[in-house]
Amino acid sequence: MPSEVEGLVETVNSFMVRLQSALDALRHFSGNASHQLRTPLAIIRTQLALSARATTLEEAQAAARKGDEAVAHAERILAQLLLMAKIDAAGSTEPQPLEVIDLIALAQQITGDRVPGAGEAGIDLGFEGDGKALIRAEPLLIGELLRNLIENAIAYAGKGAEVTVRVETDIGGVRLDVEDNGPGIPPENRQVVRQRFARGGRGQAPGMGLGLPIVEEIAGLFGGHLNLGEGPEGKGLKASVTFPAAVSA
Ligand SMILES: Nc1ncnc2c1ncn2[C@@H]1O[C@H](COP(=O)(O)OP(=O)(O)OP(=O)(O)O)[C@@H](O)[C@H]1O
Ligand SMILES: [Mg+2]
């Protein structure tokens, strides 16, 4: 090959490699997504068929209830998928100037919103943090990050568990902890659960394995990182996200 075009060939080759891996990722993602959606849709169909054949009002109502649960499940899957797609898009566009937000006020408010729901699930959800903890971030995305961590604690820690959301400032930056005293995640699985569509054991609450990857991607957008460790007294899970502290508002 003439030496003048060597650089061009290299550029085209590396572009093709990147394009191929982007396409592979997209194929993998939409394949998984449609697989995940198929289950609740099949349940909705079955329950509709059952209700059409029901001979009593009770039977029809029971089918409607199950169908409704499956719709809620499908809605949640779609919400997670849309969020993941939004984050992927945000990562590929020019970074926007970020506002300074007080993570203590935001986390306290979001935790407060979840207290009644947690109570219904038999979980004692609480918040710890005083004063202000300023970071540069987009509040809606931080809300999604926190909601995913709280939802995990509620879903997996088990009835009667205690869940604490805490915000602290230390030399490393501003740290957000969500810790529970449930079964936790064994150290050897803490890496794999961070991957998209990776889930824990069988027979757990419905989900699609996007929560922790969403948390990690959002943290990364604002210079933060996720750490998974043990909860209080070596029990349960402590998910910590550390952000660089912002200097002033
Ligand atoms: N607080 C926790 N305690 C114990 N296990 C957890 C906890 N949080 C997450 N896990 C485990 O990690 C897995 C991955 O969590 P992740 O939030 O990424 O996905 P998911 O909860 O399965 O689905 P989704 O969040 O998309 O609805 C879960 O399936 C669960 O097994
Ligand atoms: Mg989750």
Image (cartoon, rainbow, N blue to C red):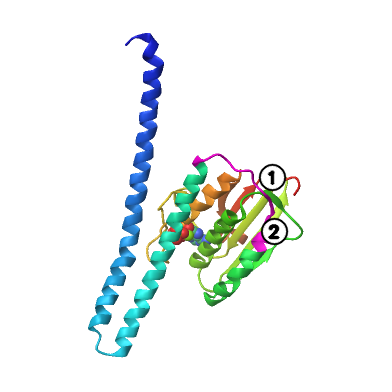
Instruction: Give the residue at mark 2.
Output: 104
In the image, taking residue 101 as reference, residue 211 lies left or right, namely left
**In what quadrant of the picture does the N terminus appear?**
top left
Left or right side of 58 for 117: right
Is 239 rendered above or below residue 154?
Answer: above
- The residue type indicated by label 1 comes to Gly
Q: Residue furthest bottom?
A: 56
- Which residue carries the number 1 mark? 172
Q: Secondary structure at mark 1?
A: loop
Whole-angstrom CA distance, mark 1 to mark 2, is 16 Å
Q: Amino acid at mark 2?
A: Ile
Return the x and y of residue 88 as percentages of the image width and height: 47, 46
| x and y percentages locating residue 133 in the rendered image | 72, 53
Q: Pointer 2: residues within 10 angstroms few (<14), some, or many (20+)?
A: many
Above or below residue 172? Residue 126 is below
Q: Residue at x 58, y 56 (%)?
A: 140
Q: Earlier in the sequence, mark 1 or mark 2?
A: 2
Q: Is mark 1 within 8 Å of ligand 1?
A: no
Q: Nearer the viewer, residue 12 or 158?
A: 12
Q: Would residue 142 appear left or right of 186 to someone viewing this image?
A: right
Q: Position of residue 247 (x, y in %)?
A: 75, 45
Q: Which residues are magenta?
A: 92-108
Q: Nearer the viewer, residue 240 or 117?
A: 117
Mark 2 Cβ and ligand 1 under 8 Å apart: no
Residue 44's place in the image compared with 178, above or below, is below
